[in-house]
Image (spheres, rainbow, N blue to C red):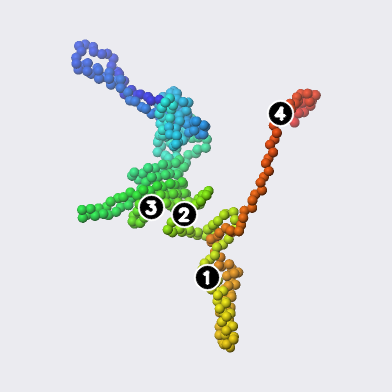
C-alpha cells in the first residue's frame, strides 16, 4: 500500500579515476547518499470504479484502481471505510485516500478535486477512461453552491444542498479599559441545520427562504437581548410523542393565522368548536337583559307607568334579537380552535379469525408421456 518515490537518480558512471583526494571522496559519498534517498507515502490516491452499498460486512466499501500503481492488488478484496460510525460514500470516478491496516485497505476521505460539495469525480485518472461515465446507478450531478464560511467555522455539507454549520454570531461591544473605550468582538455559539438551500448568490443560510431550517443560538444578540433560543421553520412541522409531549414555560403562545387551524384532542374523533368568551359574555348579558326587561315591564304595568312600558319593551326586543342572532349564527362559538368530542369512543375492531395453515404434503408425480398417447396430442399441448 505505502510506496516510496526516489528523490534523484544516480548518474555517476565511474568512481575515483585517478588520484583519490578527500574532496573527491566526499563528493562521491554525497552523491551515493543522495541517489539512495526516497520520499515515503503512507497513503495513496485511489480511483473508485464500483461502490458497494448495503452488502453485509462490506457496507459502503468500494473497488477500483490505485492511481500511482494501477497493478497494485487490493488487500481484503475491497476498500472499506476506515470509520464505522461516519461513512462518506464515494461516487464512481471520485478519488479517495487509501491507507493500510492489518492487511486490509481502508479509505479515509474523498479528495477535493473540484471543490464541489456535490461531486468530485475525475474518471480515467488511473487509465481506462470511459466516455460519459455514470457516477452510480441513481446519482445525477446537481449544481450545488458551497455555503459561505466565516473564520473558525466547522461545516458539514451534503451533496444535495443541505448542511450543518457550527459557527458563531459576532457581537461587538464597547468597554472602558484604562479610561479608554475599546471595541471587543464576542463570538456567540450558533448551530445551523438546513435542508434545501435557496440562496445561490450570497451563498448564506436564509431562515425565511430555505426549505427547512433549525437554528440553535446562545448568548446575547447585537441589541443586548437574550439570544439563547431554538428556531424551527418549514412548510409543515410534525412532532409525535408515543407517550407524552410536555411544554413548560413562563408563557406559551400558539398562533393560528387561518380558520380551523388549531385542533386539540384525538384526531380520529369529531372536532367541536370551543366557546368564544367575548361573544358568550354578550349572549349572557342579553339573556340577563331579557329577564330584567320582563320584570321591569310587569312592574311598570302594575304601577300604570305606560310610557316606561314602551321604553322597556324596546330594550327587551333588542335583547331578544341579540339572543336570536347569537343562536342562529352560532357567534358564541369559536371555530378557529377545535377540540375533540369527549363523548366519542372509537369502536373496537373485530378480531379477525386466524388464517388456516395449508397442510404440507408432496404432490403426486405424473408421467405426462403416458397420458399423451399420440404424437398429435403432444404437438397440440406444445402449441397451447
Mark toward the viewer: 3 or 1: 1
Q: Residues within 10 Å of mark 1 (few under 14, many from 20)?
A: few
Q: Along the line of sight, which residue is nearer the eye, 199 or 252?
A: 252
User: How many angstroms separate mark 4 from mark 3 (CA)?
Assistant: 72 Å
Mark toward the viewer: 4 or 3: 4
Question: Which residue does the numbered mark 3 point to in the structure image?
Answer: 228
Image location (x, y in percent) of residue 317? 58, 78
Image location (x, y in percent) of residue 194? 44, 47
Instruction: Answer with mark 1 or mark 4, whichever residue precedes in sequence.
Output: 1
Q: Residue at x 28, y 14 (%)?
A: 13
Instruction: Answer with mark 3 or mark 2, whichever residue precedes in sequence.
Output: 3
Question: Which residue does the numbered mark 1 point to in the structure image?
Answer: 281
Image location (x, y in percent) of residue 82? 43, 32
Q: In the rendered view, tell whether residue 125 sits above or below residue 249.
A: above
Instruction: Answer with mark 3 or mark 1, whichever residue precedes in sequence.
Output: 3
Q: Along the line of sight, which residue is nearer the eye, 78 or 18?
A: 78
Q: Residue at x 32, y 23 (%)?
A: 38
User: How many angstroms separate mark 3 from mark 2 (CA)?
Assistant: 17 Å
Question: Which residue does the numbered mark 2 point to in the structure image?
Answer: 247
Q: State if disc 2 and disc 3 touch (CB < 8 Å).
A: no
36 horizontally vs 95: left or right:
left
Query: Which element is circle 1 on?
Result: helix
User: How many angstroms separate mark 4 from mark 2 (CA)?
Assistant: 63 Å
Residue 362 got which mark? 4
Amino acid at each position: 500500500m505505502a510506496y516510496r518515490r526516489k528523490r534523484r537518480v544516480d548518474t555517476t558512471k565511474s568512481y575515483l579515476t585517478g588520484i583519490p583526494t578527500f574532496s573527491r571522496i566526499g563528493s562521491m559519498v554525497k552523491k551515493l547518499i543522495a541517489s539512495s534517498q526516497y520520499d515515503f507515502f503512507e497513503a495513496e490516491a485511489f480511483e473508485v470504479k464500483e461502490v458497494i452499498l448495503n452488502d453485509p460486512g462490506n457496507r459502503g466499501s468500494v473497488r477500483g484502481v490505485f492511481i500511482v500503481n494501477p497493478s497494485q492488488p487490493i488487500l481484503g478484496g475491497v476498500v472499506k471505510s476506515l470509520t464505522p460510525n461516519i461513512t462518506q460514500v464515494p461516487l464512481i470516478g471520485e478519488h479517495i485516500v487509501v491507507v493500510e491496516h492489518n492487511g486490509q485497505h481502508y479509505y479515509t476521505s474523498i479528495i477535493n478535486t473540484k471543490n464541489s460539495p456535490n461531486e468530485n469525480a475525475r474518471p480515467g485518472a488511473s487509465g481506462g477512461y470511459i466516455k460519459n461515465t455514470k457516477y452510480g446507478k441513481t446519482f445525477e450531478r446537481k449544481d450545488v453552491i458551497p455555503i459561505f464560511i466565516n473564520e473558525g467555522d466547522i461545516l458539514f455539507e451534503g451533496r444535495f444542498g443541505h448542511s450543518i454549520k457550527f459557527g458563531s454570531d459576532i457581537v461587538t461591544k464597547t468597554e472602558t479599559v484604562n479610561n479608554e473605550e475599546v471595541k471587543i468582538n464576542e463570538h456567540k455559539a450558533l448551530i445551523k441545520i438546513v435542508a434545501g438551500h435557496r440562496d445561490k448568490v450570497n451563498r448564506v443560510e436564509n431562515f425565511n427562504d430555505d426549505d427547512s431550517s433549525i437554528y440553535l443560538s446562545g448568548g446575547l444578540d447585537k441589541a443586548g437581548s437574550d439570544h439563547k433560543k431554538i428556531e424551527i421553520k418549514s412548510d409543515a412541522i410534525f412532532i409525535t410523542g408515543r407517550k407524552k409531549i410536555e411544554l413548560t414555560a413562563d408563557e406559551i403562545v400558539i398562533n393560528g393565522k387561518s380558520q380551523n387551524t388549531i385542533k386539540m384532542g384525538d384526531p380520529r374523533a369529531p372536532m367541536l368548536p370551543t366557546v368564544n368568551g367575548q361573544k358568550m359574555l354578550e349572549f349572557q348579558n342579553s339573556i340577563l337583559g331579557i329577564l330584567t326587561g320582563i320584570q321591569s315591564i310587569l312592574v311598570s304595568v302594575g304601577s300604570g307607568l305606560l310610557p316606561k312600558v314602551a321604553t322597556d319593551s324596546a330594550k327587551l326586543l333588542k335583547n331578544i334579537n341579540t339572543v336570536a342572532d347569537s343562536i342562529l349564527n352560532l357567534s358564541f362559538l369559536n371555530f378557529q380552535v377545535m377540540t375533540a368530542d369527549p363523548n366519542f369512543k372509537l369502536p373496537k375492531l373485530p378480531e379477525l379469525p386466524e388464517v388456516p395453515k395449508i397442510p404440507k404434503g408432496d404432490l403426486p408425480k405424473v408421467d405426462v408421456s403416458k397420458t399423451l398417447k399420440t404424437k398429435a396430442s403432444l404437438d397440440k399441448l406444445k402449441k397451447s
